[in-house]
Image: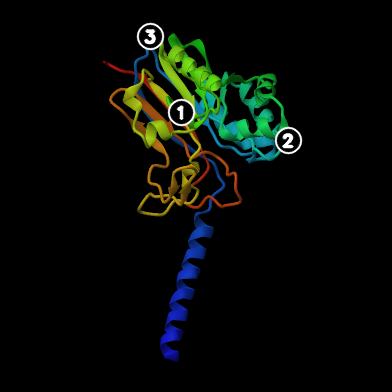
């Protein structure tokens, strides 16, 4: 019996050691650049950089390393898809300083995440005004019509579950406001880009083909924080649960596409194992359709 217990002890010890080594060697803080090339109904090629879920993290002093990485990509514009700050930290200077620096590179479009919404409730202040003062274009159930490299675009922003406002907005008035935004956003022949912090509608419910939208940028899932090797599954995703398999990447419908980034930081003190912080680069090329 003692011999059996001794064997069990050493087996468990080996498993713990291997797990510990794996966590240490695969916990990365260096930002990676993930690139996707997509066809789109546009006239001319253009490049978009996405940042999401910073959660007040810093890469280099005042995020100098992160800004330099973005600058090196030479984007035509930048999209920030929410949760750049933390809901329970009143100081939002990290997010504001980052937006200010990025706005010195090109236009920055910023949509709220659930952290920004909660922050406003916690501190009774307008988060968007701080971002506007830093040079960002804030999209919170509104949109901007812009021309980029000869392409007519409509860029909109929303935090919640698209076409399911009852899951995000509490009052009938707010739900009607959201429905009005969605209807007016889709009512155009322009190429439509939606910044939607929560990807559930597009990735898990697979509604990409149900609305007149061309391209969606999302975050929120944090890549599952810990990504298991081989399986590609993550540990946990907010509102989805344990061991999800749709964590990041490009999800395609018949015409529309959702780009889901695993983001940069974490709201909780959990290491990002096998899941490096990332910025996303999307190169849109004119399709032949």
- Find residue 10 and report its horizontal and vertical position in percent: 46, 79
Q: Which residue is mark 3?
A: 189
Q: Residues within 10 Å of mark 3 (few under 14, many from 20)?
A: few
Q: Residues within 10 Å of mark 1 (few under 14, many from 20)?
A: many
Q: Between residues 111 and 80, which one lies in front from this camera angle?
A: 111
**Where does the C terminus fall, quadrant-wise?**
top left
Q: Which residue is mark 2?
A: 91
Picture residue at 51% right of the left edge, 30% below the top: 168
Could you tell me how far apart the alpha carbons at marks 3 and 1 are, in whole angstroms? Answer: 19 Å
Say whether residue 34 is left or right of residue 212: right
Q: Which residue is mark 1?
A: 217
- Look at the numbered disc 3 and give the secondary structure of its residue: loop
Q: Residues within 10 Å of mark 2 (few under 14, many from 20)?
A: few
Return the mark for residue 232: none
- Find residue 154 and report its horizontal and vertical position in percent: 46, 13
The quadrant in which residue 102 appears is top right
- Who comes first in sequence, dot 3 or dot 1? 3
């Amino acid at each position: 019996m003692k011999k059996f217990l001794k064997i069990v002890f050493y087996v468990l010890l080996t498993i713990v050691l291997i797990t510990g080594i794996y966590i240490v060697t695969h916990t990365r803080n260096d930002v990676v650049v993930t690139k996707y090339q997509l066809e789109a109904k546009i006239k001319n090629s253009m490049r978009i950089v996405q940042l999401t879920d910073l959660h007040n993290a810093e890469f280099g002093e005042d995020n100098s390393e992160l800004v330099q990485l973005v600058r090196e990509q030479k984007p035509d514009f930048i999209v920030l898809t929410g949760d750049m700050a933390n809901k329970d930290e009143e100081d939002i200077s990290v997010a504001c300083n980052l937006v200010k620096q990025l706005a010195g590179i090109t236009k920055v479009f910023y949509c709220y995440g659930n952290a920004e919404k909660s922050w406003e409730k916690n501190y009774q202040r307008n988060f968007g005004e701080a971002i506007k003062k830093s040079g960002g274009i804030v999209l919170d159930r509104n949109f901007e019509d812009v021309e980029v490299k000869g392409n007519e675009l409509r860029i909109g922003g929303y935090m919640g579950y698209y076409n399911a406002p009852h899951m995000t907005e509490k009052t009938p008035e707010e739900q009607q406001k959201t429905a009005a935004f969605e209807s007016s956003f889709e009512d155009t022949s322009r190429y439509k880009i939606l910044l939607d912090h929560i990807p559930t509608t597009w990735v898990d419910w697979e509604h990409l083909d149900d609305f007149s939208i061309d391209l969606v940028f999302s975050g929120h899932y944090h890549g599952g924080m810990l990504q298991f090797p081989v399986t590609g599954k993550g540990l946990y995703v907010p509102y989805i649960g344990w061991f999800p398999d749709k964590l990041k990447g490009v999800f395609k419908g018949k015409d529309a596409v959702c780009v889901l980034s695993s983001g940069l930081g974490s709201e909780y003190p959990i290491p990002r194992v096998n899941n490096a912080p990332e910025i996303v680069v999307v190169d849109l090329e004119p399709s032949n359709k």
